[in-house]
Image: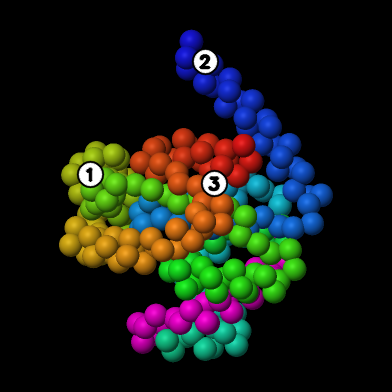
């Protein structure tokens, strides 16, 4: 009975969400969303699910890596500026990243809003992003969704990932194991682990993430746009929480 009641509530919620999404067309301002979370917390997956939910709307998913690669591929002035920096394995400075985001959000595919994935991470970046958006008509940060998850669980998730490199098929030693250990189900070829999918490297990345983002999250909490989600849930449950946070 409880499950039937929960399913009924979800159906009602998704129906209401549909009408709220439809109303976006009559709004003057686009929807500005930021996804914040440690590596492996599911930000990219949830951004794709949200973009699909908003199909028909010109809302773009902007991840820092994709934006940089696109700028280089398209031969833009910014792309020419960042290409030698990336080839040297160095970090692109905040001023250049802000300029790249400005360029991206003013593209036609971002007319109805944007989902920023992986930026900002620091307080300085958050403040500079707000200052830039203040100069752009109808561009704001409306929602910041933090994907919170225990570090130990995240380590367990990521260190168990397996990849069949030729096809891109992925497995997990615990959550989605191959039929034969370390072999692809389709071809029988060997599976590999990414070189950085080891606990020592991941712990360092998580420590860096927490030290960088704490102040930025506090800043967004102070502006009233921050919502923290439980990223340990299943993807479809997190997707429900994302929609509820944005349109509930």
Q: Can residue 44 be seen?
A: no
Please say whether residue 213 is one of the residues in the magenta stretch.
no
Seen from the viewer's position, the closer of residues 198 and 121 is: 121
Q: Which residues are magenta?
A: 86-109
* 135 relative to 196, above or below: below
Q: What's the mark number on residue 248?
A: none
Label whose residue precedes the other's in the sequence (2 or 3) = 2
Q: Are marks 2 and 3 in contact (CB under 8 Å)?
A: no
Where does residue 158 sit, x and y in percent of width and height? Answer: 28, 52
**Residue 88 lies in the magenta stretch:** yes
Pick the quarter of the image with the C terminus.
top right
Q: Is residue 205 left or right of residue 104?
A: left
Say which of 224 and 3 sits in front: 224
In this figure, which residue is indicated by the disc labeled 2? Answer: 4
In the rendered structure, which disc, 1 or 3, sits on the residue that comes first in sequence?
3
Q: Measure the alpha-carbon separation of dots 1 and 3.
A: 25 Å
First in sequence: mark 1 or mark 2? 2
- Where disc 2 sits, the SS reads helix
């Amino acid at each position: 009975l409880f499950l039937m009641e929960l399913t009924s509530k979800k159906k009602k919620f998704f129906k209401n969400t549909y009408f709220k999404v439809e109303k976006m067309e009559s709004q003057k301002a686009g929807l500005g969303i930021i996804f914040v979370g440690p590596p492996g917390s599911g930000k990219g997956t949830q951004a794709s699910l949200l973009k699909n939910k908003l199909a028909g709307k010109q809302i773009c998913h902007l991840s820092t890596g994709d934006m940089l690669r696109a700028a280089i591929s398209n031969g833009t002035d910014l792309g020419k500026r960042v290409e030698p920096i990336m080839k040297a394995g160095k970090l692109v400075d905040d001023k250049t990243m802000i300029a790249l985001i400005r360029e991206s959000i003013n593209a036609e595919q971002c007319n109805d809003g944007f989902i920023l994935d992986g930026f900002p991470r620091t307080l300085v970046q958050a403040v500079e992003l707000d200052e830039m958006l203040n100069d752009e008509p109808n561009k704001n940060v409306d929602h910041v969704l933090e994907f919170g998850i225990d570090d130990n669980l995240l380590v367990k998730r990521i260190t168990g990932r397996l990849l069949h490199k030729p096809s891109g098929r992925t497995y997990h030693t615990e959550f989605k194991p191959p039929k034969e250990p370390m072999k692809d189900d389709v071809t029988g070829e060997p599976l590999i682990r990414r070189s950085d999918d080891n606990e020592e490297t991941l712990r360092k990345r998580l420590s860096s993430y927490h030290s960088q983002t704490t102040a930025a999250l506090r800043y967004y909490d102070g502006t009233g746009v921050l919502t923290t989600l439980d990223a340990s849930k299943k993807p479809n449950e997190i997707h429900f929480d994302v929609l509820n946070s944005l349109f509930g």
